[in-house]
Image (spheres, rainbow, N blue to C red):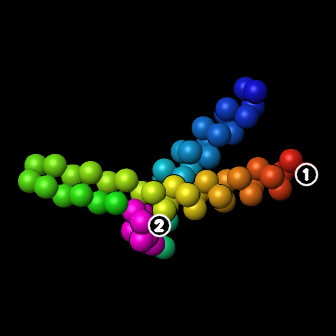
Amino acid sequence: MTRTLVLLGLLLIVAGLAWPLISRLGFGRLPGDFLVRREGFTFYFPLTTSVIVSIIISVLVWLFRK
């Protein structure tokens, strides 16, 4: 369990550092990602991006367990 948490933490760090490169590919601005801007308030909910990332992670976990 400890090994899994450390690997997950490292993966999140790498993803955070690579986010500027990933955002250039279009992630974060997909149709279905909600952005609401009002005076003094901004709300962003990346629904489509979250679904795609979830599918990719699920496939990778499924492949590594085989």
First in residue order: circle 1 vs circle 2:
2
The residue lying at 8 percent from left, 53 percent from top is 39
Alpha-carbon neighbours of circle 1 within 10 Å: few (<14), some, or many (≥20)?
few
Q: Quadrant of residue 52?
A: bottom right
Up the image or down, 57 lies above or below 23; here it is above
- Residue 26 picture location, percent across and down: 45, 72
> Visible in this render: residue 1?
yes
At horizontal 67% and vertical 53% (from top left) the residue drawn is: 57
**Of residues 35 and 27, the one drawn nearer to the viewer in this rendering:** 35
What residue is shown with label 1? Answer: 66
Whether residue 40 sits left or right of residue 12 in the image: it is: left
Q: Secondary structure at mark 1?
A: loop
For label 2, the SS is: loop
- Hey, what amino acid is under mark 2? Phe
In the image, which residues are magenta?
26-33
Q: In the rendered image of this protein, does residue 2 appear above or below residue 60?
A: above
Q: Position of residue 15 (x, y in %)?
A: 54, 52
Three-letter residue code for mark 1: Lys
Query: Does 42 appear above or below 49?
Result: above
Q: Residues within 10 Å of mark 2 (few under 14, many from 20)?
A: some
Badges 1 and 2: C-beta atoms under 8 Å apart? no
Q: Residue at x 39, y 62 (%)?
A: 33
Q: Which residue is mark 2?
A: 27
